[in-house]
Amino acid sequence: MRKLLRFGGKGKAKLEPEERPMTSDLQIRADLIQALIPIGLEAVGEVLAQEVGQLAGPRYSRTGGEPGHCRWGSEPGSVYLGDQKLPINRPRVRNRKAKQEVALKTYVKLQQPQMAAELVF
């Protein structure tokens, strides 16, 4: 434990142990979750990009992926991480032959709070 040099009355110095505020275990866990959220969002973005790549093929490529599927921009969305609903930019995939949007399985799973906790652990 570190010691602090304190000057009292009459200019006398004495060493006292440094007082630190006690942090609760709950506060430490909350701080840890807050620090890991950006990393979790980055990982979610990578997983969604990988799934889009499997469906529509590599970016700027006319071949690969499933026939008729293409990238269709993105839109604002949200996912659950650690019981928190967080905003994310959701990529879109469309099936041109069927003229309908293709749901991303990972995104659908991360939209449900209990499923997000199970996927993380």
Image (spheres, helix red, strand yellow):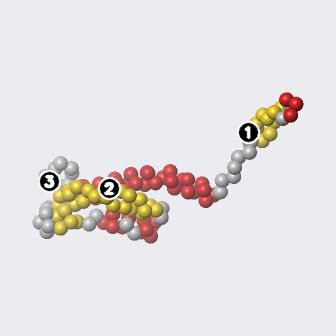
- The residue labelled by disc 2 is 89
- The residue labelled by disc 1 is 2
Q: Identify the element where label 2 is drawn.
A: strand
Image side of residue 13 versus residue 26, left or right:
right
How dense is the environment of label 1, judged by Cα within 10 Å: few (below 14), some, or many (20 and up)? few
Q: CA distance from mark 3 to mark 2?
A: 25 Å
Most foreground residue, 91 or 106: 91
Residue at the (37%, 61%) spot, across then down = 78
Location of residue 101 by image quarter? bottom left
Disc 3 or 1, which lies upstream in sequence?
1
Q: Give, as a three-letter code, the residue at label 3.
A: Thr
Is mark 3 in CB contact (under 8 Å) with mark 2? Answer: no
How dense is the environment of label 2, judged by Cα within 10 Å: few (below 14), some, or many (20 and up)? few
Residue at the (34%, 53%) spot, across then down = 46
Q: CA distance from mark 3 to mark 1?
A: 64 Å
Q: Position of residue 117 (x, y in %)?
A: 46, 65
Q: Position of residue 53 (x, y in %)?
A: 24, 55
| Extreme-top residue of the structure | 11
From the image, state whether disc 2 or disc 1 is nearer to you.
2
